[in-house]
Amino acid sequence: MLSKDSSLETAKNTADNLYQLMELINSNIIDMDIEQIISLSGLCLDLSAQVSMWMDSEFERREKQRN
């Protein structure tokens, strides 16, 4: 799980996982049940929120270092 204190490598891996999951959903959506689509979409939202939170924290860290 990506947290505010995670490394850049962990953030990259999380973003890559999100991309791969979205690609999987996109290429198989016709064959999926609605429950699968809803569940996997929720996972995508969770991963994107983690990446967004990490990016906000990283931006703040870099701003503090600059000042």
Image (cartoon, rainbow, N blue to C red):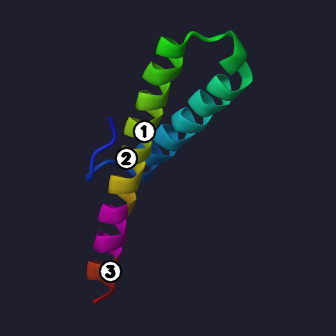
Q: Nearer the viewer, mark 3 or mark 1?
A: 1
**Which amino acid, mark 1?**
Leu
Residue 5: x, y in percent?
26, 52
Does the segment drawn in magenta span residue 34?
Answer: no
| The furthest residue to the bottom | 67
Q: Tell me the quarter of the image containing the C terminus.
A: bottom left
Residue at label 2? 49
**Which amino acid, mark 3?**
Glu
Q: Residues at badges 3 and 1 in contact (C-beta under 8 Å)?
A: no
| The furthest residue to the front | 34
Q: Nearer the viewer, mark 3 or mark 2?
A: 2
How crowded is the residue under tag 2: few (<14 C-alpha within 10 Å), some, or many (20+)? Answer: few
How crowded is the residue under tag 1: few (<14 C-alpha within 10 Å), some, or many (20+)? Answer: few
Q: Secondary structure at mark 2?
A: helix
Residue span colored magenta: 56-62
Mark sitting on residue 45: 1
- On screen, 34 above or below 67? above
How crowded is the residue under tag 3: few (<14 C-alpha within 10 Å), some, or many (20+)? Answer: few
| 40 left or right, relative to 21 | left
Sooner in the amino-acid sequence: mark 3 or mark 1? 1
The residue at the point 52 percent across, 43 percent down is 15
Q: How far is mark 1 from mark 2, CA to CA?
A: 6 Å
Residue 41: x, y in percent?
48, 29
Sooner in the amino-acid sequence: mark 3 or mark 2? 2
Q: Residues at badges 1 and 2 in contact (C-beta under 8 Å)?
A: yes
The residue at the point 53 percent across, 20 percent down is 37
Q: Secondary structure at mark 1?
A: helix
Residue at label 3? 63
